[in-house]
Amino acid sequence: MGTLEEKQTIPSSFQEMTNVTAVLEFRLLGFSSNPRCQILLFTLFLVIYILTILGNMIIISVVTFEPQLHSPMYKFLKNLSFLEVCYTTTIVPKMLADLLAQRKTISFSGCMAQLYYFISLGATECYLLSAMAYDRFLAVCEPLHYGVAMTAESYTCLAVGSWVTGGFTGFLPCLMVSRLHFCRYNLIDHFFCDISPLLKLSCSDTTVTEAVIFILSLLVLSSCFLLTLVSYLLIILNILKIPSASGKRVTFSTCSSHLMVVTIYYGTMISMYVRPTYNLSSELNKAASVLYTVVTPLLNPVIYSLRNKAFKKALGQVVIRHHRLHSL
């Protein structure tokens, strides 16, 4: 019939009083129950997902095979593109399957795994964007020392450090949520396992869990955002000192793409998490979640491919080489 549940080994009188069960699966409410609407959403999200994977894989391939793009700036971009592929794959395939399914369920362990990767990859993106901002700061404000400060070893430390630190960031929130008790009612009013709907679903006292997760989120978001903000403020101040308008334009063009990605990412994340949630409808909450889990990963390849002249030139060379190879 419904939920697979099994009683915890506690006294029956206490069970009857608290009605606590060990939930083995959750049901995801998802989007509209209208079949036509679900097919429309499935088609839309599938197209966006395919474009996201293709776009980011093109960036990874071009940066890998074009020697002129082997600078730290483009290596960071390759890391960001790979992260976007992982990030959107954590959410979208399951969401697509649920749009066509009669019964939208996810196991408890699957839910916790999705939650862990969602948090870890989100934190990793914050760290990577900060590292990319620091790289642009060195390139614009300290050009004479850039080769010494941003060596291959420095890049490796920043890139690997971002991934490792992001991986550790996801452990504590996921562990604390997994240790909560969930009652018989196991319907998650969302299309994936996010922190907020899981905390609302728990019949445990979530005060400590909410406080720890809020503090950790605030530390990660605020520290990375401030580091990125300071880097770009210094970059802008340095650009304003350039006497010629063409010099200002050329210098700003080297970091404008990354600045747009940063603005979009932090804009969606801050609007989603740094505001009261009690007066936001579940539908509006889902719409905001779609923005940063489905749409934002697509914007990364679009922005970099359209605004970066060096990347467009390298992409053109790859296309010409590929055409010549197949015309022989």
Image (cartoon, rainbow, N blue to C red):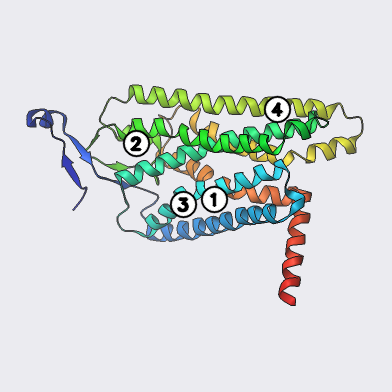
Q: Which residue is mark 1?
A: 85
Locate residue 211, reporting x and y percent.
40, 22
In terms of sequence position, does the residue under pointer 3 or pointer 4 come before the other? Answer: 3
Quick one: SS at disc 1? helix
Estimate the spatial distance between the alpha carbons at disc 1 and disc 3, rounded to whole Å.
10 Å
Q: Which residue is mark 4?
A: 231
Q: Amino acid at mark 1?
A: Val
Locate residue 301, reporting x and y percent.
64, 50
Q: Residue 113, located in which quarter of the rendered image?
A: top left
Estimate the spatial distance between the alpha carbons at disc 2 and disc 4, rounded to whole Å.
36 Å
Q: Amino acid at mark 2?
A: Leu
Frontmost of labels 3 and 4 is 4
Frontmost of labels 1 and 3 is 1
In terms of sequence position, does the residue under pointer 1 or pointer 3 come before the other? Answer: 1
Q: Which mark is residue 198?
A: 2
Estimate the spatial distance between the alpha carbons at disc 3 and disc 4, rounded to whole Å.
33 Å
Circle 3 packing at 10 Å, graded few (<14), some (14-19), many (20+), is: many
